[in-house]
Image: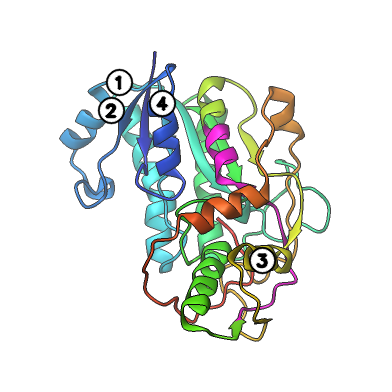
Amino acid sequence: MTQVLLLGAGGFLGRPVARALQESPEFTLTAAPRRTALDLLGAREADWNRLLLDPVPDVIINAAGRTTGTLQEVHEDNTLLVKTLLQHLKRLRLSPWLVQFGSAAEYGQTGTEPVTESFVGHPASSYAQSKLDATELLLRQFGTGQARGVVLRIFNPVGAGQGAQTLPGQAALKFRQALREGTETVSFGPLDSARDFVSLRDVTAAALFAARLQQGPPVLNVGSGQPTLSRTLVRALARLAGYRGEITEQSPPSARSGAVLWQQADLRAMTALGWAPTFTLDGALEDLWHSLPPTFPAPKETAHGTLHL
């Protein structure tokens, strides 16, 4: 049995990974405590010792992180946490296989061709920069043999439990709200960007696949391999919801990813290793829609015409 330590088990990406690990006969899961119980950035050596030595993990999956917040907040949660983890692993002379959840946001604007892992990123937000900083830190450690692992550059996940800080999550809440209140118009920011939307189920499968690797390329794209207009996604979700009102694009663009007009994953490196996406975007949207709680607060009037994890 492979012992896995999962950071971020309570998050959108971490929850299904935790369930899949628990259901797999290959893995034994230890989930790091939620931040309210143990803030790893401020944890004492004794806390880290318990986390990393009882039991000693064969694999650490880092699904923790922050997509929004101040410059300091995203740096701490996305970069400094990785640095702190590496420091404690070195102190304890441990060398588990690391699976880091990176982001396609690290690439920035890529043009209209599928982007490979060797593309030099130009992050367009503080979030994207913090994720790229974490990746580069890990790559330096991988290159010198001080650590082992892989960074999964996850494109635009869609699935159950998705939050309103993303386009799919925001759209689902807005359509549910409109249906409940009889609203005839739902407004978004510009929806002419293209994104590689990938089912959360595929992201989960990719995480377990990466946990089994133990060697291979240091960075791997995880996506559907297909570009989809944000407008197409929103209209597909409207059809699924049964919303027949007007959809406008008059709200301000997303501050986090509005500058990136097109992204599409080149999956050749992953498929060469034996992984490929198998779930559809329609299925992912159904997962999202049916996961909405019966009641919820009205969505904030912030535009998310595009999405980056």
> Is disc 4 surrounded by few (<14), some (14 to 19) or many (20+) residues within 10 Å?
few
The numbered dot on residue 239 is 3
Q: Amino acid at mark 2?
A: Leu
Quarter holding the N terminus is: top left
SS state under label 2:
helix
Q: Give the labeled residue for mark 1.
A: 56
2 vs 3, front mark = 3
Q: Position of residue 132 (x, y in %)?
A: 56, 51
Residue 295 in the image: above or below residue 75 = below
The image quarter in which residue 68 lies: bottom left
Q: Give the labeled residue for mark 2.
A: 52
The answer to whether residue 158 shows anywhere in this view is no
Whether tag 1 and tag 4 are in contact, CB under 8 A, the answer is: no
Tell me what residue is drawn at x 21 percent, y 29 percent: 49
1 vs 4, front mark = 4
Q: Position of residue 43 (x, y in %)?
A: 21, 44
| Residue 42 placement, left or right of 152 | left
SS state under label 4:
helix
The Cα atoms of the two marked residues, 2 and 1, are separated by 5 Å
The answer to whether residue 69 shows anywhere in this view is yes
| Residue 163 placement, left or right of 115 | left
The image quarter in which residue 299 lies: bottom left
Q: Amino acid at mark 1?
A: Val
Lower position in the chain sequence, tag 3 or tag 4: 4
The Cα atoms of the two marked residues, 1 and 4, are separated by 20 Å
Whether tag 3 and tag 1 are in contact, CB under 8 A, the answer is: no
Whether tag 2 and tag 1 are in contact, CB under 8 A, the answer is: yes
Magenta highlight range: 187-207
3 vs 4, front mark = 3
Whether tag 3 and tag 4 are in contact, CB under 8 A, the answer is: no
The Cα atoms of the two marked residues, 3 and 1, are separated by 48 Å
The Cα atoms of the two marked residues, 2 and 3, are separated by 47 Å
